[in-house]
Amino acid sequence: MEDATTLMNYNGKLGLLMFDFFNGKSSGFEFWVLEDFDKKEWSDHVYVFPPVWQNVVEKTTLCFSGVVGTTEFVFVPNTLSGPFYVFYYNIEKNTVVRVGVRGMEAFEGYTVEAFSNHVENVELIRAF
């Protein structure tokens, strides 16, 4: 097991991603899912990034951000610098998609905390 882990809801079950940080030299990751709480049964999944991962990610240091649905793992840079990209790794198709986010230049050097599948209620709250 690695030194760092992230707990998440994975399709209604407890998921555990084994990781430190990811970059273009990373080959993949190990992912555990608690299949049966009472029996303490875990399933172990090892995902290997496709060869294009190295070219798409390059020297960017990434952190795991979450899962979209049950197939796309989301990675974001741990620090804002230069063009800002979010990376989606599809575990079924073994593909990587890099999506650029514009307008982040003013925050260069800041640490990134990203949450997948988070919806903020931006409805105006009125004071009476």
Image (spheres, rainbow, N blue to C red):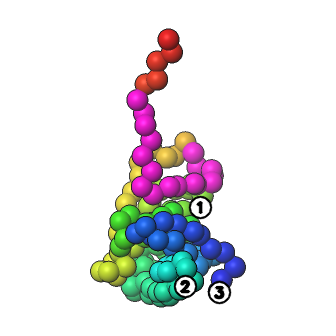
Q: Nearer the viewer, mark 2 or mark 1?
A: 2
Q: Describe the element under mark 3 as helix, strand or loop.
A: loop
Q: CA distance from mark 2 to mark 3?
A: 21 Å
Q: Residues within 10 Å of mark 2 (few under 14, many from 20)?
A: few
Is residue 31 at least partly visible in the picture? no
Kindly identify which residue carries mark 1.
78
Q: Amino acid at mark 2?
A: Lys
Q: Position of residue 119 (x, y in %)?
A: 42, 46
Identify the residue at horizontal 37%, vertical 79% (top origin): 91
Kindly identify which residue carries mark 2.
39
Q: Farthest residue to the right: give it.
A: 3
**Is 43 rendered above or below residue 11?**
below
Q: Amino acid at mark 3?
A: Met
Q: Quadrant of the N terminus?
A: bottom right
Q: Position of residue 10 (x, y in %)?
A: 45, 70
Residue 29 or residue 61, whichever sits in front: 29
Tell me the magenta residue range: 107-123
Q: Nearer the viewer, mark 2 or mark 3?
A: 2
Residue 1, numbered circle = 3
Q: Position of residue 127 (x, y in %)?
A: 51, 15
The numbered mark, 1 or 3, whose residue comes first in the sequence reads: 3
Residue 85 placement, left or right of 61: left
Q: Amino acid at mark 1?
A: Asn
Q: Position of residue 14 (x, y in %)?
A: 51, 71
